[in-house]
Image (spheres, rainbow, N blue to C red):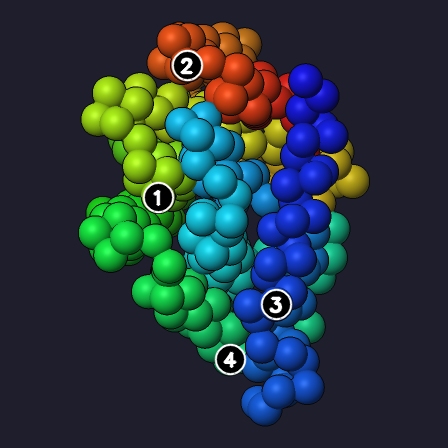
Amino acid sequence: MDIRKYLKGKKEYVDKALEGILPSEEEFPKNLHKAMRYSVFAGGKRIRPILVIASAEAVGGRIEDVINAACAVEMIHTYSLIHDDLPAMDNDDLRRGKPTNHKVFGEALAILAGDALLTLAFDILAKSHNKAENALTVIHEIAKASGSMGMVGGQAVDMESEGKECDLPLLEYIHIHKTGALMLACIRTGAALANASKKQRESLTRYGEAIGLAFQIADDILDIEGTKKEIGKTVGSDAKKKKITYPSVLGLNESKDRAKELIQIALDAVKDFDDKAEPLRKIAGYVVERKG
């Protein structure tokens, strides 16, 4: 299958759904809604919502049953980017090739836009038409992955570690929580909403754990080898901020080897699935081959 065609098609589906979910720019308070929509539609490949869809499809689920959850995780991801870019954190001027939210709307409105996206995500999850038991499982899964035991916790440790000597276990903690936790939740969400069996969920969990860590390692590598046009932000920003990354701890070549090892673990985890899991297999390869 052509993975780029698959990703493009699913991105368009997700974008259309997001368009219908997010409040209009003309709806009061207008500036807040403009700020929310600005970052959601600033670009991005929609990898996280697509992982929700692909994992559901892998076990026979339908996109219609998971699209709200897919949109919810994209809104959570976008909120995290808005807040990460703030002067109090990463202080970035560019995101996806465009000025960051606070550069356009100011810091206060950027914070509120992030807050609004996060709460809207859980509003959408709570309105799921799936079985109540599945919906509660997903809300718990995504909430845990987004909070202090997941993404927010990873960001906190990442900030505290800047400029310090850090070992591999701490580095893995940061990457697994800051990036991997939400990506794993995407996989488990799609599986849960598609009524996957216990065995299928276990296999998809192994896939999600591996793909989430590999994705962040690939990001670390892109910050060194990518271009401003490819990654949509300033190249080398991790090194300038003295952030702990895989290349800074293991070296560039060993980081590439580790990413490849993780992709193989992900592929092995779904080797017994039928052709419906082919998008997941292709996405695994895409993670380390992408240029942005």
Q: Earlier in the sequence, mark 4 or mark 1?
A: 4
Q: Residue 32: give x, y in percent of width and height.
A: 57, 81
Kind of residue at badge 3: Gly
Q: In percent of the image, x 37 and y 66: which residue is there?
A: 127
- Element type where label 4 sits in the image: helix
Q: Is the residue 111 above or below the residue 173 in the image? A: below
Mark 3–mark 2 distance (CA, rounded to whole Å): 33 Å
Q: Determine which residue is flagged by label 1.
A: 193
View extreme (bottom): residue: 28
Residue 200 in view, yes or no: yes
Kind of residue at badge 4: Ala
Q: Which mark is residue 273?
A: 2
On screen, residue 57 versus residue 208, left or right, reads: right
- Element type where label 3 sits in the image: helix
Q: Earlier in the sequence, mark 3 or mark 1?
A: 3
Q: Is the residue 43 above or below the residue 125 in the image? A: above
Q: Earlier in the sequence, mark 4 or mark 2?
A: 4
Q: Is the residue 221 above or below the residue 115 in the image? A: above
Kind of residue at badge 1: Leu
Kind of residue at badge 2: Phe
Q: Determine which residue is flagged by label 3.
A: 20
Q: Which mark is residue 108?
A: 4
Q: Mark 3 near mark 1, Cβ–Cβ under 8 Å?
A: no
- Image quarter for residue 50? top right
Q: Earlier in the sequence, mark 3 or mark 4?
A: 3
Q: Earlier in the sequence, mark 3 or mark 2?
A: 3
